[in-house]
Amino acid sequence: MTNVLVVGGGPAGLSAALFTQKNGLETTVFDTDGTWMHKAHLFNYPGIGSQDGSAYMETLRTQVDSFGVEHLQQEVTDVAATDDGFTVTTEEGDHEGSYLVLATGADRDLADALGCAFDGDLVEVDLSMETSVDDAYATGAMVRAEEWQAIISAGDGAAAALNILSKEKGEHYHDFDVPADAAATFGPEE
């Protein structure tokens, strides 16, 4: 069983996957590569001077995959809560996990199928991006009216991941790395 199931491979989903996998929670991402980022050009994203959205997504996927995230190019057709967490259904089969992060842009169908509460057309979440369904999170455009912006979505994914990590660790968890962490992960700088 995977710890975290992430549906959506845009900035929100990949940010959630990066934080959870990097911090020891086995994570699977379901991605159809339908992100709006392919239509974007970034020059308002901190740390990025000017970059094509598709090039940015390739960099982000490489980073996430380097931590060992299971990255499946599969469309999710259904999600359901179980006694032990969640089941994600694709044409290739079912996948089980303890936590679910929905990062499907403005497509709210899976949140509706799961039974998440809505406020009008938006999925209702708390500050940590958790929905009315325990251990299920919604991010990005599905929770924000007309606020479809990459860095906001990435922040939503990170907030969901940190809440999941806090639940797993039993205390508030902070993902804050120092140079020694980078050296341990990537080797010393030359």
Image: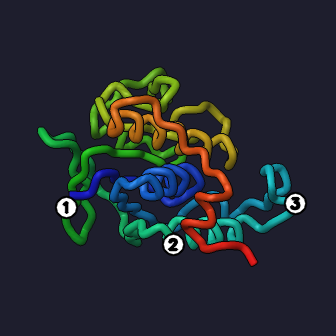
Q: Residue at x 25, y 51 (%)?
A: 97
Q: State the image coordinates of residue 92 (x, y, percent, origin top left).
A: 23, 71
Image quadrant holding the C terminus, namely bottom right
The amino acid beneath tag 1 is Asp
The amino acid beneath tag 2 is Ser
Residue marked by disc 1: 94
Query: Is 142 left, or right, of 102 in this rendering?
Result: right
Query: Is 77 left, or right, of 139 in this rendering?
Result: left
The amino acid beneath tag 3 is Gly
Image quadrant holding the N terminus, namely bottom left
Contact between labelled residues 1 and 3, with CB atoms less than 8 Å apart: no
Secondary structure under tag 1 reads strand
* Label 3 – label 1 distance at C-alpha: 41 Å
Q: Residue at x 58, y 60 (%)?
A: 35
Q: State the image coordinates of residue 37 (x, y, percent, origin top left).
A: 66, 60
Q: State the image coordinates of residue 154 (x, y, percent, origin top left).
A: 61, 47
Check disc 2: other Cα within 10 Å, few if <14, some if 14-19, many if 20+.
few
Query: Is 125 left, or right, of 167 in this rendering?
Result: right
